[in-house]
Image (cartoon, rainbow, N blue to C red):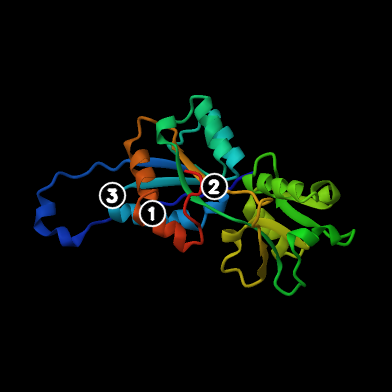
Amino acid sequence: MFRRATHRTFLLGVLILGLAACSEPAVEQTDLTLAAAASLRQVIPAALEGFALAAGERSIDVTYGASGDLRRQVEAGAPIDLVVLASAETVDALIDNGLADPASRRVVASNRLALVGPSASPPLTFATLNRLPGDARLAVGDPRTVPAGQYARQALENLGSWNHLEDRLVFGGHVASVLAYVRRGEVDAAIVYETDAEGLADIAVWEVAKGDWAPDPQVVAAVTDSDSPDAQLLLDYLTSARGQEIFFSFGFDPPTNP
């Protein structure tokens, strides 16, 4: 499942252009539809504000959801101009199926997997998850559609814990739902991206996945409508120095696998 949200970003005018701007012909407003992973629901609005300031007036619709669900929407013919997803494999599948421009593919940023839990609970580590009591529950994204869940499974398999914990897992349709399980006290711990837990007073980051066993989550984007020049403009902005600063300010790291 995914939640559709619409952000309308407008630049009403730039006063410093003065009278010179008045002599320029009006720029026709262009609609742009962006599909973004749910794990980007905090950073994307800030990036769109920056894009409006840099590129001028635009009307942008944003759909947030699990990357796998968004891929299926593109495959079903949804009018999406640009995807920014939490999985390189998902974007590459769209490219392989002729639904995204291979020349536009960009790695926008990287992330880190984190083990989190209620701030008042004793902390655990990835290595000690096997010691969870039999009635304890661990929330992860659904590995069938949610990259964070796929990364969580990869990490636990590398640690030899997946089979031991499998019957105690609670799957979420996207990272926001996984966090909600923890915040409502329905699970004892969860595996999400570190950026998802930032600024949440009731959630503690117990451990960030590091080492040879840890996955390397990447945020990858591609243009899915070659007839939309604004899609390429937005993608260029996200990977520009200013766009990267915005991602970094929300806790993301530079791309590690461009």
Q: Quadrant of residue 197?
A: bottom right
Q: Secondary structure at mark 2?
A: strand
Q: Residue at x 33, y 42 (%)?
A: 233
Residue 55 circle label: 3
Residue farthest toward the right in the current orientation of the protein: 134
Residue farthest toward the bottom in the current orientation of the protein: 120
Residue 69 position within the rendered picture, expressed as x and y whole percent measured from the top left: 60, 39
Three-letter code, disc 2: Gln
Q: From mark 1 to mark 2, how far is it between C-alphas?
A: 16 Å
Residue farthest toward the top in the current orientation of the protein: 98
Q: Quadrant of residue 89?
A: top right
Q: From mark 3 to mark 2, how far is it between C-alphas?
A: 26 Å
Q: Which residue is mark 1?
A: 243
**Sequence-first tag of 3 and 2:** 3
Q: Which is in the foreground here, disc 1 or disc 3? A: 1
Structural crowding at the residue carrying mark 2, measured as other residues with C-alpha within 10 Å and reported as few (<14), some (14–19) or many (≥20): many
Q: Secondary structure at mark 1?
A: helix
Q: Secondary structure at mark 3?
A: helix
Residue 215 position within the rendered picture, expressed as x and y whole percent measured from the top left: 64, 49
Whether residue 134 sits left or right of residue 251 in the image: it is right
Structural crowding at the residue carrying mark 3, measured as other residues with C-alpha within 10 Å and reported as few (<14), some (14–19) or many (≥20): few
Whether residue 81 sits left or right of residue 200 in the image: it is left
**Sequence-first tag of 1 and 3:** 3
Q: From mark 1 to mark 3, how far is it between C-alphas?
A: 12 Å
Residue 218 circle label: 2
Contact (CB < 8 A) between labels 1 and 3?
A: no
Residue 252 position within the rendered picture, expressed as x and y whole percent measured from the top left: 50, 57
Q: Residue at x 9, y 57 (%)?
A: 19
Three-letter code, disc 1: Gly
Closer-to-camera residue (190/217) = 217
Quadrant the N terminus occupies: top right
